[in-house]
Amino acid sequence: MFKILHKNGKARRGEFKTVHGTVQTPVFQNVGTIAAIKGAVDTFDLREIGCQVQLSNTYHLHLRPGDETVKKLGGLHKFMNWDRPILTDSGGFQVFSLASLRKITEEGVSFNSHIDGHKIFMGPEESMRIQSNLGSTIAMAFDECVENPSTHDYVKASCERTYRWLVRCKDEMKRLNSLDDTINKNQLLFGINQGGIYEDLRIWHMKEIAKLDLPGYAIGGLAVGESHEEMYNIIDKVEPFMPEDRPRYLMGVGTPTNIIEAVARGVDFFDCVMASRNARHGFIFTRKGTLNMMNAKHSLDTRPIDEECNCPACRHYSRAYIHHLFKAKEMLAMRLCVLHNLYFYNELMARIRTAIEEDRFEEFRRENSGMLDTRIP
RNA sequence: GGGAGAGUUCCCGAGUGGCCAAAGGGGGCAGACUGUAAAUCUGUUGUCUUCGACUUCAGUGGUUCGAAUCCACUCUCUCCCA
C-alpha cells in the first residue's frame, strides 16, 4: 500500500495507494472540516490547485448535516463531488479545541454541541461508526489531543487511555468494514501517537501502537502550545519507533518551515488550517516570505501576490486589486487568497518531492527553512 | 418675515460645570492565527520626547477657582408657519 520510492537522508519520497487513487508523498492535505474548504473553494478549484487529499471532520459532520444523512446521500465523496482520497479526523482534536464543552471518561467523551449545546457522546466506537458512514478513505483513531504543557501524570494517564481507545477503534473498524451496507469496506485506520512533550511517554506509546500493525501512523498533540524546538525534538525521538514501511502523518502542522523540518525528520503526511485560515485573514505565503494583503502598502501595487506563482489569483490579479477586495470586505478576496495559499502549500510539497528525488533535499531545506515564514519587509 | 431645533475628535454619535483628549459604533493603521466554535480575535487611532505638557467640542467675547457643557452676539445647517 505504501511504497518508499526514494530516500534522501531521512526524507522520504513515497506513494500511498488507496481505493480512491494514489497519493504522492510528502503530501499536504487540504482542510475542509465541514466538507468544504472555507472561502468558497470548490472541488474544481482543488483539482486546479494540485490538491491530492481533502481532510474533513467527524465531529463537525456528525453535528451537521449528520453522518447518517451523508451516508444516505452516498457518502462523503459523492456528497462533495470529490473522487480522490479523503481523510477524516476523528473528533480527537475537538477534545482539545472544545475543552470547555466536554467531559472525558474511560468510555469516551461527552460534548455539548458548540452549535446548540445539546449533548453528544463520542467514544472510539462512535467515531469509527461516523467515519464509516462518511465513507472516507482514511479514518483517524479517536484520541485525546492534550494541550502542551500538561503534567506528566495527566499525559501518562491520557495516552494510556488513548492506547486503549485505539484498540477499540481497530476492533470496531474491522466489524464495520465487514458489514454489507458499508460505503467503503476498504476504509483504513491510522493510529495516533500521543505523549505530550515527554519523550518517555511518546516512545512507550509509539512502541505500543506500532504493534497493532495499522496502515499508517500519526503524531498528534503537537503544535498545541509547545515551542518549535520541543516539537522537533519529539519528532526526532519518536520517529525511530515508527514503522518504516507505513506513512507517517504529523497532524495539524504547520508553517512551511515546520513542514520542511518534519520532512527532514521522516514525515510524509501533513495538514494545517493555517494555509486557508490565514488566507481568509489576508496573510499570504510566497516563495520570498509572507505578506499581509490588508497592509496599505499594497494599494497601488500592480504586481501579483507572488511573481513566481502560477495560481489562479497570481495569474490574473494584482496585489492592489486583492487589497481593495479585502478593504471592501468582498468574499472574492478570501477566495483568491485561499486559492493562492493552498496552491502554495501543494506546490511546496511538489518541490519537496522533487528535491528528494534529485537528492538535494538538504540544499532545499537550507534555502527555504525559516525564510518562508518570514515577513517580507 | 415669524417660530422651533442643531453644529463634538477622520465619519456617525454620547456627553448639559470639575472624575473629558472626551463613551459607543464606523473607518484608518498594525498584529495574531498550526488535526477550523475563526469572514475571527487583539492592539492602536489630537500633538509633543515619557512622567507630563500643550492644542481641541462652529466663531468671537463673557460668567466661573474651573466651560464641550452656562450667557451674549456672529456664522452655518435643518424643520414648521407665512
Image: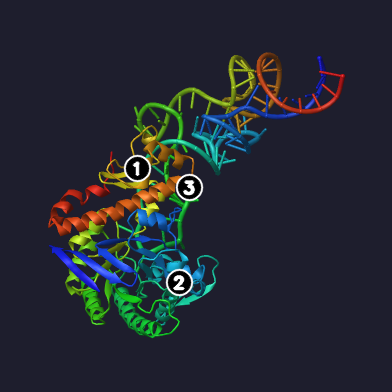
Circle 2/circle 1 CB separation < 8 Å: no
- Residue A297 to residue B73: above or below: below
The residue located at (14%, 56%) in the rendering is A358
Give how far across and how far down residue A109 sits, in percent: 43, 76
Rounded to the nearest angstrom, the CA distance separating label 1 from label 3 is 19 Å
Mark 2 — residue?
A75
Give how far across and how far down residue B55 sits, in percent: 49, 22
Give how far across and how far down residue B60 sits, in percent: 59, 15
Please report whichever mark, 2 or 1, sits nearer to the chain's N-terminal start: 2
Determine which of the numbered discs, if any, sits on residue A315 in the image.
1
Q: Chain of mark 1?
A: A
Q: Amino acid at mark 1?
A: Arg
Please report whichever mark, 3 or 2, sits nearer to the chain's N-terminal start: 2
The residue located at (34%, 63%) in the rendering is A53
Q: Chain of mark 2?
A: A
Rounded to the nearest angstrom, the CA distance separating label 2 from label 1 is 35 Å
Assign a secondary structure to mark 2.
Answer: loop
In the depicted view, which residue is nearer to us: B66 or B39? B39
Give how far across and how far down residue A31 sits, in percent: 38, 61
